[in-house]
Image (spheres, helix red, strand yellow):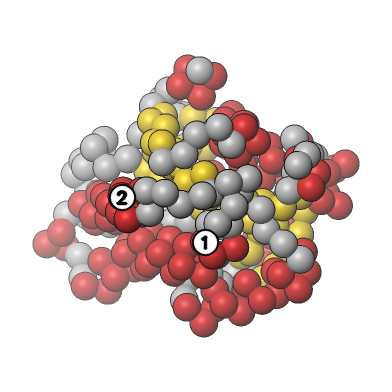
Amino acid sequence: MSNSDRLVLALGGAGTVGSGIVKALLDKGFKVAVISRDSSRLERLRTFVSPDTKENLTTIVGSVGSEVGAEQAKAALLDTVGKVTDIVSSLGFSWWQGGPPHSQTLKDLHWVMDTLLFSTFVSWKAFFPLVKDDSDRTYTFVTGGAEKLLMPGTGFLTVGAASTLSFCQILREEYPETACKLNQVKIDAGVASPERMAPGFLNHLELGEFVARLVEKRNCSHTVFNVRTTEDLRA
Ligand SMILES: NC(=O)c1ccc[n+]([C@@H]2O[C@H](COP(=O)([O-])OP(=O)(O)OC[C@H]3O[C@@H](n4cnc5c(N)ncnc54)[C@H](OP(=O)(O)O)[C@@H]3O)[C@@H](O)[C@H]2O)c1
């Protein structure tokens, strides 16, 4: 199956990490679909990707963070594109500096868990059945690491990141023989677009190329790729 016969659903594809992945996948000839709650983010994504690949990008307004929303988005997606061969999930948020736990509310913690863990779980439950039984199909999680995040003011960010890491580990262990290629890219660094780069950050375009190569190759499963530096992306 050539890349042009493959349709990648990029969950979180309108975000900082996801947009780099979407551009790289399109540049490799894949068809790509992105679901976002925000039509203006999808519009920005359309102007961001290489102009000659735009016709291979499908955008759908919807929410994959609730069970009902994810099922509605799935129905709209399948109506539009027919099939999904690969899924990349980079749901969440870029950074959170809400303060130490004693200064936070339960609502803050709910928001962190909702955005990092619950959306990842709910969308996996809705979309995994589309790819799980086919060894030519892939499901790739892109997550933060938990070790380097814990610093003053980021307590709940670490709670959310650690829970997503645990969720990915559970999937690897609960589904050891799933046919589709189930992998995780774990990033222990900041990620930004070229205009917003800071020391130690990864360029979202280079990260996107790394993930696109992984999806294209389909040569491993149940593997965690630890990424800390640009060199890791070029390995
Ligand atoms: N940026 C970094 O520095 C960095 C570094 C290491 C790891 N990561 C990891 O990469 C992932 C993505 O980060 P990012 O920087 O790309 O964040 P981002 O720019 O905020 O994008 C996150 C995406 O997730 C989607 N999303 C969040 N909550 C959702 C919900 N409840 N329902 C549906 N969609 C939801 C958003 O969708 P909408 O378009 O609908 O808003 C958005 O497109 C996170 O897991 C993060 O831990 C990021």
Identify residue for label 1: 128
Nearer the observer, 14 or 123: 123
Q: Which residue is drawn at the image coordinates 65% and 36% (left, top)?
A: 216
Q: Is residue 12 above or below residue 108?
A: above
Q: Amino acid at mark 2?
A: Glu
Q: Is residue 118 above or below residue 191?
A: below
Q: Are marks 2 and 1 in contact (CB under 8 Å)?
A: no
Nearer the observer, 82 or 70: 82
Q: Which residue is drawn at the image coordinates 42% and 49% (left, top)?
A: 177
Identify residue for label 2: 173
The reply to whether residue 231 is visible in this rendering is yes
Could you say where residue 203 lies in the image, as x and y percent from the top left?
55, 30
Instruction: Name which quarter of the figure residue 11 lies in.
Output: bottom right
For mark 2, does the 10 Å Cα neighbourhood hold few (<14), some (14 to 19), or many (20 or more) residues? few
Question: In the rendered view, does 106 fall on the left or right side of 11?
Answer: left
Identity of the residue furthest to the left in this view: 102
Q: Amino acid at mark 1?
A: Phe
Could you say where residue 32 lies in the image, as x and y percent from the top left?
72, 52
Image quarter where the N terminus lies is top right
Q: Secondary structure at mark 1?
A: helix
The reply to whether residue 10 is visible in this rendering is no
Q: Which residue is drawn at the image coordinates 58% and 46% (left, top)?
A: 135
